[in-house]
Image (cartoon, coloured by chain):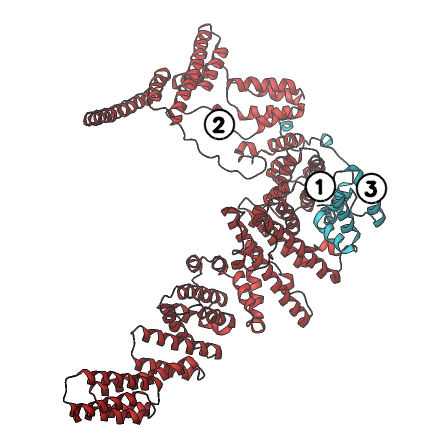
């Protein structure tokens, strides 16, 4: 056993030694490999990287190995070209030699070769564009392209490139022309190879780019030439890249009448073409991107706006008919307008609204509804939010275009339709609830707390939690909008206008998402005096206010989180309401456990309890369950004493009176307080509630205990006369019973005590006389008489 | 369940067409007799039919009054991209 352990220790020591050695070797290999790589000795560098990779395989080193291979290949290719170049130079074929050297530089940068190229170029006659110009002037574009190509073979020449591009456009080769007239990429992008000594880059996520075709890079000064821009734009237009084409034409800056006309024509062609393409199977995405790109160029042009809107609605209709609701949702979410609804859906680059926005709530309500039919846990909350908002708010339910349509439901039928549509949503919620719970008996409209109490044995924990969240969301959203509708109806009835709250109607979640809460809060504050005694006013106000999150957490029973989420704002109506609710709930939680020091909770909740009777009733209900639990009685008494200082309701005073007297009784029974304390407490309790029978009993009990104490004291001193007087005055059965118990005891004691007979007789006579004062009929009198007679008999003998 | 799809009828189907759609729907056996009867009942009642219309139709083309305007704007001379003439007003070469 010991040996095996030692062996293990040795092995473990050896293993850590090996590790250290490997690490050192690995580091050395990498250092050597990097140095060789810097010196462009890619073969040796690869060898060292490979050895390191064998010790600790990693993606990073693997990439370096591949980089060595690629660079070695390029170097070999460049070396071959250099060899060829030298050979051609020896053969006095300078032009060909120059070309070979230039190609080698394209493969691999080499200072010596670059110097050699410069030297050869100086020896050769300067390439000239004149033949190209001449051919172009003669409209011999193919020849001009060839001449410009010759210049480009000898040197990098932007003018040659541009002229060649323009000739290609004239020849109808738009693809190649666009490539040539494209702004120059950087050198690295051109060669596509890694610079010398550059460290490998760690792989990372691709940098996100806004949707749409690649934005043209800033053209270099020579590319801003109107002729180049025009031909580049024309080529792009012919390739169907309309947005880019028009942007190129915008760069020209000089709108000649011909160009202005052509731009207008191109726009019309583009729009017709894009609309056509968007309606072809599988072509929509590209056409849409192109259209969005056009919109970016011409945000204020009605033609483009109409095109965007028309294409968008047509596409949505197509998806609707295919019942591809998920694609509809994704598409709506991708419409990131500058302001309003869609910009809030996701944090993406924005696009200008072209009049689609106002339809989005209406579309999304239906989309979420159908998605929720098959995937309630994911989509039902949004279905609730959008559906309730849309069906209650005429602005969303019937967009302006629809309102003018004579076949549409008139206002009189609106309420009925709204009610029917809300019922449909209720059915969806109920269906989800039933599927999770496996029950259908309970109503879906019980409160949040109640819903959690039903039998959910069939649902797993996750589903159960989700159901609870969704039901809570449903309750909040439904009750909130119902209440707002009630206020709006009253407002319309009083003012005869629906330009107020009716136009703002939405659920709290909808308002939060689309930043519509402030005007609703303002409206609520305007009607505060009418509704402030209805707690729904406060709940709904809080849901639209900064306290929303806190209130939601409170309703989920997450009290500490609710408190933490409460905004620091003071003197905010709804934040204060929410704070009072949290303090009340925290206090109640502690009260149920029988904790003390609850003043900080209930004193904060007093305005809430004063305003809404339900909170007072909840406390009163709790008193019924505390029974004989002294700790809970103490705790409850503490809370009630705080409350009655501010709230003088009859129910609260009565229950406080009872709890005070219960507590006093329990404490007295436990020996924790004296009779005087009980008397004081019971008197105080009777001040609160004079008919408190329990307090009256308590007082009587206390009084009898006082007499008992006096009686005991008299009996202790064997003062039977005084004891009899106390008993007579007390008129209390207990006291009388105690007195005669003593008489019995004294009689027994006297009969057995070795005392002078005469003295015994005197004492017995005294006992007899005082007992007779208390109760002349008591049987003990006979016993005393018998004892006296017996003693007298014995004395006579 | 979409009652229009169950009965395979358009949104504007008349009461008569709804009734006439029942036997073919039964023959297709795509839906149960109960589902077909429910669909018929739902669409025969004007109130529940309105609800069904709201739920199962999008009618986005109705809203796009501007869509018609767009067609009008584009209805003039129809030019294709191939017809777009190449302008020479920027040709500087001619000056050379």
Q: Residues within 10 Å of mark 3 (few under 14, many from 20)?
A: few
The answer to whether A648 is drawn above or below residue A430 in the figure is: below
Q: Is residue B45 left or right of residue A449?
A: right
Residue A189, numbered label: 2
How far from the left and from the top, in percent, is residue A191? 48, 23
Q: From the image, tell me which residue sits under label 1.
A: A321
Mark 3–mark 1 Cα distance, whole angstroms, equals: 25 Å
Mark 1–mark 2 Cα distance, whole angstroms, equals: 46 Å
Residue A689, numbered label: none
The subunit letter for the residue under badge 3 reads B
**Helix or strand or loop: what does disc 1 sit on?**
helix
Q: Share a chain, discs 1 and 2? A: yes
The chain in red: A
Residue B23, numbered label: 3
The chain in cyan: B
Mark 2–mark 3 Cα distance, whole angstroms, equals: 69 Å
Query: Upstream in the sequence, badge 1 or badge 2?
Result: 2
Q: Share a chain, discs 2 and 3? A: no
How far from the left and from the top, in percent, is residue A140? 66, 19
């Amino acid at each position: 056993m010991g040996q095996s352990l030692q062996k293990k220790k040795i092995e473990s020591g050896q293993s850590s030694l090996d590790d250290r050695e490997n690490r050192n070797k690995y580091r050395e290999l990498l250092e050597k490999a990097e140095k060789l790589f810097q010196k462009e000795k890619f073969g040796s560098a690869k060898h060292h990287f490979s050895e390191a990779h064998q010790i600790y395989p990693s993606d990073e080193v693997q990439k370096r190995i591949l980089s060595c291979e690629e660079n070695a290949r390029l170097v070999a290719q460049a070396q071959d070209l250099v060899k060829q170049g030298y050979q051609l130079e020896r053969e006095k074929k300078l032009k060909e030699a120059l070309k070979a050297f230039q190609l080698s530089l394209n493969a691999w940068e080499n200072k010596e070769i670059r110097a050699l190229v410069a030297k050869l170029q100086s020896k050769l006659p300067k390439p000239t564009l004149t033949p190209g110009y001449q051919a172009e002037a003669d409209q011999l574009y193919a020849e001009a392209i060839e001449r410009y190509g010759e210049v480009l073979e000898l040197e990098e020449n932007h003018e040659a490139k541009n002229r060649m591009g323009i000739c290609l456009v004239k020849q109808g080769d738009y693809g190649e022309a666009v490539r040539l007239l494209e702004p120059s990429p950087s050198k690295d992008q051109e060669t596509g190879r890694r610079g010398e000594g550059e460290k490998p880059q760690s792989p990372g996520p691709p940098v996100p780019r806004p949707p749409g075709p690649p934005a043209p890079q800033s053209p270099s000064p020579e590319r801003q030439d109107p002729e180049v821009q025009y031909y580049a734009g024309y080529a792009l237009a012919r390739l169907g890249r309309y947005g880019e084409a028009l942007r190129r034409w915008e760069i020209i800056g000089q709108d000649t009448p011909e160009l202005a006309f052509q731009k207008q024509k191109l726009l019309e062609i583009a729009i017709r073409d894009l609309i056509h393409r968007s309606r072809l199977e599988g072509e929509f995405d590209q056409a849409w991107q192109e259209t969005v790109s056009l919109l970016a160029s011409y945000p204020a042009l009605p033609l483009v706006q109409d095109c965007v809107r028309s294409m968008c609605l047509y596409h949505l209709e197509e998806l609707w008919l295919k019942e591809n609701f998920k694609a509809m949702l994704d598409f709506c979410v991708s419409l990131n307008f500058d302001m309003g609804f869609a910009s809030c859906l996701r944090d993406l680059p924005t696009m200008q609204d072209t009049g689609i926005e106002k339809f989005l709530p209406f579309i999304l309500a239906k989309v979420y509804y159908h998605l929720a039919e098959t995937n309630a846990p994911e989509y039902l909350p949004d279905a609730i939010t959008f559906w309730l908002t849309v069906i209650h708010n005429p602005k969303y339910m019937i967009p302006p275009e629809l309102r003018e349509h004579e076949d549409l439901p008139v206002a009189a039928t609106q309420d009925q339709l709204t009610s029917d549509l809300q019922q449909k949503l209720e059915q969806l919620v109920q269906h989800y609830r039933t599927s999770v719970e496996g029950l259908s008996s309970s109503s879906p409209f019980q409160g949040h707390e109640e819903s959690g109490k039903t039998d959910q044995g069939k649902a797993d924990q996750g589903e159960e939690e989700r159901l609870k969240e969704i039901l809570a969301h449903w309750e909040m959203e439904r009750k909130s909008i119902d209440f707002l509708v009630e206020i709006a109806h009253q407002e319309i009835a009083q003012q005869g206008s629906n330009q107020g709250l009716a136009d703002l109607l939405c659920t709290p979640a909808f308002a939060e998402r689309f930043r519509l809460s402030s005007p609703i809060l303002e409206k609520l504050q305007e009607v505060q005096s009418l509704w402030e005694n209805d707690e729904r006013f406060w709940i709904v106000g809080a849901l639209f206010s900064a306290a929303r999150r806190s209130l939601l957490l409170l309703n989920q029973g997450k009290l500490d989180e609710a408190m933490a989420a409460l905004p620091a704002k003071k003197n905010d109506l709804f934040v204060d309401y929410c704070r009072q609710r949290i303090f009340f709930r925290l206090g109640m939680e502690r009260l149920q456990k029988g904790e003390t020091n609850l003043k900080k909770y209930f004193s904060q909740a007093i305005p809430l309890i004063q305003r809404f009777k339900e909170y007072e009733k909840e406390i009163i209900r709790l008193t019924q369950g505390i029974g004989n639990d002294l700790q809970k009685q103490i705790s409850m008494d503490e809370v009630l004493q705080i409350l009655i200082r501010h709230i003088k309701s009859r129910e609260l005073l009565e229950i406080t009176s009872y709890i005070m007297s219960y507590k006093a009784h329990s404490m007295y029974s436990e020996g924790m307080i004296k009779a005087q304390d009980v008397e004081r407490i019971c008197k105080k309790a009777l001040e609160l509630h004079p008919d408190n029978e329990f307090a009256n009993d308590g007082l009587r009990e206390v009084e009898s205990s006082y007499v008992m104490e006096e009686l005991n004291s008299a009996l202790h001193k064997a003062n039977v006369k005084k004891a009899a007087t106390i008993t007579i005055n007390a008129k209390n059965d207990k006291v009388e019973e105690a007195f005669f118990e003593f008489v019995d005891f004294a009689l027994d004691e006297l009969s057995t005590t070795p005392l002078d007979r005469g003295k015994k007789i005197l004492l017995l006579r005294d006992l007899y006389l005082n007992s007779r004062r208390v109760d002349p009929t008591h049987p003990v009198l006979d016993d005393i008489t018998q004892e006296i007679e017996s003693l007298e008999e014995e004395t006579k003998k | 369940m979409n009652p229009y799809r169950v009965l395979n009828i358009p949104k504007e189907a008349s009461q008569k067409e709804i009734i006439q759609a029942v036997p073919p729907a039964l023959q297709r056996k795509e839906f149960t007799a109960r589902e077909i009867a429910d669909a018929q009942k739902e669409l025969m009642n004007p109130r529940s039919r309105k609800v069904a219309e709201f739920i199962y139709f999008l009618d986005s083309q109705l809203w796009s009054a501007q869509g018609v305007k767009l067609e009008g704007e584009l209805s003039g001379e129809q030019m294709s991209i191939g017809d777009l003439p190449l302008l020479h007003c920027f040709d500087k070469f001619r000056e050379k």
